[in-house]
Image: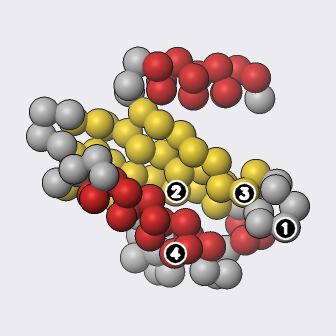
Amino acid sequence: MLEILHRFKVGYEKKYFVKMGIEEKVSGKLIGIISLYAIDRLNNNLKIGFILNREYWRKGIMSEVAKPVILFLFSKLGINILEAWVHPSNIASI
């Protein structure tokens, strides 16, 4: 776990990517991660990815989490293009 956190820190410091945790409201337990990567400052675009513990699927969590993050990216950071990769079998995310 410390190695993963170290890689997250280095990636953030070098502006390669940003990782944000998703926590369960009641317990504060880490249940997922939001990744911003392939950051292209010249053209103001990036890619976004989400990982959520399977136990929390189909509870509306990703919709709740994604909306303010995406709004922030477009309204405050001036992102022009946001690309998301979705696994073909993940119908709910599509």
- Alpha-carbon distance for marks 2 and 4? 11 Å
- First reached walking from the N terminus: tag 1 or tag 4: 1
Mark 2: few/some/many CA within 10 Å (<14, 14-19, 20+): many
Residue occupying the point 20% across, 34% down: 41
Task: Give the quarter of the figure containing the N terminus.
Answer: top right
- First reached walking from the N terminus: tag 1 or tag 2: 1
Residue 83 appears in view: no
- First reached walking from the N terminus: tag 4 or tag 3: 3
Q: Is residue 27 above or below residue 10?
A: below
Mark nearest the camera among 1 and 2 is 1
Q: Amino acid at mark 4?
A: Ser
Mark 1: few/some/many CA within 10 Å (<14, 14-19, 20+): few
Residue 55 in percent (x, y) is at 77, 69
- The residue tagged 3 is 23
- Alpha-carbon distance for marks 1 and 2? 20 Å
Mark 3: few/some/many CA within 10 Å (<14, 14-19, 20+): some
- The residue tagged 1 is 26
- Alpha-carbon distance for marks 2 and 3? 13 Å
Kindly state the secondary structure of the residue where label 3 is placed.
Answer: strand
Q: Residue lying farthest left?
A: 43
Instruction: Left or right? Give the position of 30 relative to 18.
Output: right
Q: Amino acid at mark 3?
A: Glu
Mark nearest the camera among 2 and 3 is 3
Q: Are marks 1 and 2 in contact (CB under 8 Å)?
A: no
Kindly state the secondary structure of the residue where label 1 is placed.
Answer: loop
- First reached walking from the N terminus: tag 2 or tag 3: 3
Mark 4: few/some/many CA within 10 Å (<14, 14-19, 20+): few
- The residue tagged 2 is 50
Q: Is residue 86 above or below residue 40?
A: below
- The residue tagged 4 is 63
